[in-house]
Amino acid sequence: MLIIGFESSCDETGVAVACTERGLLAHALHSQVAMHRDYGGVVPELASRDHIRRIVPLTRQVLDEAGVRPDDLDAVAYTAGPGLAGALLVGAGFARAFAWARDLPAMPIHHLEGHLLSPLLADETPGFPFVALLVSGGHTQLMRVEGVGRYELLGETLDDAAGEAFDKSAKLLGLGYPGGPELSRLAEAGDPRAHALPRPMLHSGDLDFSFSGLKTAVLTRMRSLRDAGLDTDHAARADLAASTEAAIVDVLASKSLEALRRTGLRTLVVSGGVGANRHLRARLREALGALGGRVYFPPLHLCTDNGAMIAWAAVLRVRAGLVDLPSLRGDAAFAVRPRWDLRDVCAA
């Protein structure tokens, strides 16, 4: 079965074709980073308009690269949420029209399920069950994953997500957009022990997260640097960047290890944009190795939002028998869900 997947939840337009027998055949991605950089963050209206411009050329490109004609497809998958409402509507509207015109079933896919299952696209893949750390710009969650569609929430952020902590701290440091990668690059030249920044909820006794207090601490330290005339000093800013990154990584790693201890599992999966962070990867690999466990990440180019994870989530749902394809055929009506709990897509 051939499935085409569309992703447009925020500032990346992604399209991919996957096969239930042969795996991922082709995918293409357009990032809007350059467009949003002048504004210091994502402008929803501009994001939606750019999705409209990109989705048709990307679809043609992916079909050509996969060697697939539109009439060869068996189903369409698209991100239905969570995300920016306008951006979601572009991808969902195009996908539903594409499916309706060809009398194909159209599968709404949860964006976070796509991230959660994206490490299964790597050359080496984990077996079920495992603990998953979903860590991105908008979400930080720990899940116990028993199988496709079988997810148990263990803990989540109570305020800012880890990606937001990276981005907002980067903005305080005067760095450009996207802030997380910029902060990590600056941190390479700094001392992570230079500032004793807080590790919020590190000893809270649960698996929840909080990063808003860390952001406030970075703001206070930047004010101190400014008062000392060091706010533009590269070394001083690098030390603060390195200390910020270390604090975030400490919390993410510690909570993930505690989740493994509580569940008795030895396999951790990390997905989402922050999963590309080099220090987080090294820290978790070292810790899991010491425990006799294993940590898995998606390929670096699939850490951010992409169509491959949406098409692959659809493939895995079909393989698991969780999709009634005939019931998804022939209906052009659709809705998107900017807010959508991952537990709502769990199998009965």
Image (cartoon, helix red, strand yellow):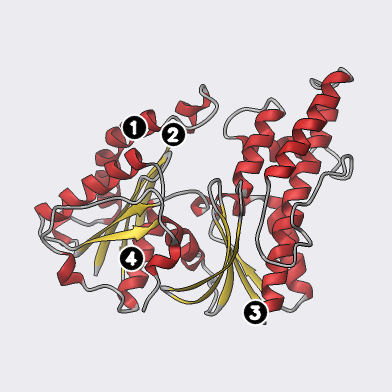
Apparent side of residue 110 relative to residue 321 in the rendered image (left or right): right
Label 1 to label 4: alpha-carbon separation: 25 Å
Task: Give the number of the mark in front: 3 or 4.
Answer: 3
Q: Do the numbered discs 2 and 1 sit on residues whose CB atoms are within 8 Å?
A: yes
Question: Decide: marks 3, 4 in contact (CB < 8 A)?
Answer: no
SS at mark 2 in the image: loop
* Nearest to the observer: residue 47 or residue 70: 47
Between discs 1 and 4, the one toward the N terminus: 1
Say whether disc 2 or disc 4 marks the residue closer to the N-terminus: 2
Q: Please give the residue where the numbered disc 1 appears in the rendered image.
A: 50
Res. 293 visible in picture: no
Q: What's the residue at 51%, 21% (across, down)? A: 38
Residue shown at the point (43%, 38%) measured from the top left: 11
- Up the image or down, 317 lies above or below 188; here it is below
Q: Amino acid at mark 1?
A: Asp
User: Label 3: how many residues lie within 10 Å, few (<14), some (14-19) or many (20+)?
Assistant: few
Q: Nearer the viewer, mark 3 or mark 2?
A: 3
- Residue 132 in sight: yes
Under circle 1, the secondary element is helix
- The circle on residue 263 is 3
Q: Is residue 144 left or right of residue 287?
A: left
Which circle's residue, 1 or 3, is located before the other in the chain? 1
Residues under numbered marks 2 and 4 in contact, where contact means CB atoms less than 8 Å apart = no
Circle 1 crowding by C-alpha within 10 Å: few under 14, some 14–19, many from 20: many
Kindly identify which residue carries mark 4.
314
Residue at numbered disc 2: 32
| Residue found at x 52% / y 26% | 37
